[in-house]
Image (cartoon, rainbow, N blue to C red):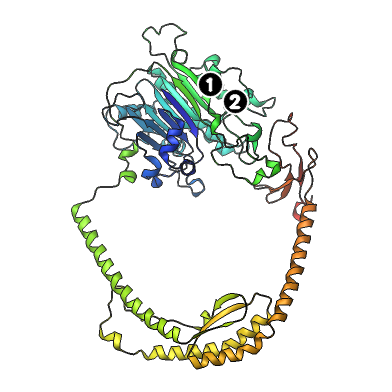
Amino acid sequence: MKIVTYNINGLRPRISQFGSLRKLLDSLDADIICFQETKISKQELRADLVRADGYESFFSCNRNFDKSRAGYSGVATFCRVKSAFSSDEVALPVAAEEGFTGLLESPRVTGPQKDECSSALEGLEEFSRDELLKVDSEGRCVITDHSHFVLFNVYGPRADCDDTERIQFKGTFFKIIQRRWECLLHQGRRVFVVGDLNIAPAAIDRCDAGPDFENNEFRRWFRSLLVENGGQFVDVFRTKHPDRREAYTCWPTNTGAEEFNFGARIDHILISGSCLHEESGQEEHNFVSCHVEDCEILIQFKRWKPGNTPRWKGGRSIKLEGSDHVPVCVSLEEIPSVPPHGAPSLSTRYCPQVYGCQQTLVSMLTRKQSAESVKNSEESSSFLEAHDCSEGSARQRSCSTTFCLGSNLAKAGPHVETRKKARQSQWSQLSLKSFFQKSSSHSETFARSANDIKLSQTDVSASFCCSNSSPVHVEVSSNPKDCLADVSASSPADNGCDDCQLSVKEKSNVALLEWQRIQQHMQNSIPLCKGHNEPCVARVVKKAGPNLGRRFYVCARAEGPASNPEANCGYFKWGASNSKYKR
């Protein structure tokens, strides 16, 4: 059995990258696939995004109505099964729950699963209901019970060091979810925790770890969970590979750090509980030692490949396709089957947004009748419009003339008003007699339009020949005599077009030279980095503060270790200071 966790950084772009949801899932070749950061709201759940043949899926979406966090976070668990009904496969959960506080359970949940959800609130008396809902409303956890173990698919909050509100939110999140783990372990259940926890536990798991790196409160909390520090969980990857360095799962998106593997290991698989063997009384008998075959980071999913163009040779403008994370997988062995069961009610196959709502026979007939009436009205209106257009086009063809003022084509549209026959309403239908009646207003409008065109043609000719813009063709429509007169009147103005073209060419050359001078000035104003003597890249401060909007220059190479001379040299220089930035 194989379990994969993967922060996909948006489900839609990953589906687009692989061609379909089924191809994305099959590329991971796992029995249970846990996605984080799906970035899909409840209203956006569609079959092509959440359903794939051979898989059952369970989603948790962001319920926060704050516009700044719309389509934010979100997790999903996909289980590869042969049947969703009466199946003995371990991959198909016997129960599923959205969130981890027990307050987001579906109204369809009944029986033992409902009792288990209500027991989730045990030990959380110190938190109010509003606090619990706030922590559990960002779509950061899906729980699936696979009989032998309970799987938590978790997307841990991210908090900047100066964001007090999010730091408090992150601490409350982990404190509450840890209570849920302890409650299940106290009941004798095995607990698997997989996902992007946004925590690099030790210095070996971070590229640029400083002396006080491990003193962070969340790193201390993570290490307190581990068996070697008196906790109950095993960090499966570090247990299987205790000395492996530069084993990272995430890289910054804006510095090209993947090129030199300058990242962090923040995607984890934690397991707690006894093994499935009957003689499990000995200490060395735990789930990891008895049933975990291996745990690996799937680096083949990295965005940057060895053949990509380096950033300082033009690769900086190339957008890498894929997530800024890579999957982590664990392979299990000797996992026995379970009693036959069906898919839980949280499965997306039962979601109304996916399968739709059942309609009554009366509503279907009503919609059909209204659709037929709309279709008949559209046919009648299209016939009337076609008749009007045929009259107008025939009249226009009989007296249209084109005269040349240059190379582009323009129509004297602003001077011509085309009016269709007015109808009383969308559903009104003209009588047969109305087609044989002459419209007095139509002939007056046509005559007035012809006069406007005659008056404007001289102005058009003069303005086009004396302006700096490119000459154009103008198509006008009037009666044949007026058209001939207009052409003969405009011909003297055409004699000066050659002089106009020469003037335009001269001005174009002047503009080109000026633009080249500006580009050269801009190029000379870009500083060279001290480490490589190469042009820097300009950036702008986007973080709120006194320097918001200020331009600065940094080395254009990809971020990497300081010991690597090919990596970013760390050069930094502020741009030209405006008066508001002067000290």
Q: Residue furthest left?
A: 362
Q: CA distance from mark 1 to mark 2?
A: 10 Å
Residue 344 pos. (x, y %): 31, 32
Q: In the displayed structure, does residue 314 sit left or right of residue 239?
A: right
- Give the residue drawn at x 39%, y 26%: 122
Indicate left or right for 276 with 579 as reference: left
Does 497 appear above or below 187?
below
> Residue 469: x, y in percent?
66, 75
Give the residue displayed 41% in from the left and 90% down from the top: 443
Q: Amino acid at mark 2?
A: Ala
Does residue 31 appear to the left or right of 524 in the view shown?
left
Disc 2: CA contacts within 10 A as few (<14), some (14-19) or many (>=20): many
Rendered image quadrant of residue 511: bottom right
Checking the image for residue 237, the label placed there is: 1
Q: Residue at x 23, y 60 (%)?
A: 368
Q: Residue 357 versus residue 12: which sits nearer the camera?
A: 12
Q: Nearer the viewer, residue 147 or 220?
A: 147
Nearer to us in this view, 137 or 419: 419
Q: Residues within 10 Å of mark 1 (few under 14, many from 20)?
A: many
Determine whether the residue tagged by mark 2 lies in a helix, strand or loop.
loop
Vertical placement of residue 238 versus 500, above or below: above
Which residue matches tag 2? 247
* Amino acid type shown at disc 1: Phe
CB within 8 Å, label 1 to label 2: yes
Q: Is residue 442 above or below residue 19?
A: below
Regarding residue 248, the answer to whether it shows in the image is yes
**Above-or-below relation of 260 to 439:** above
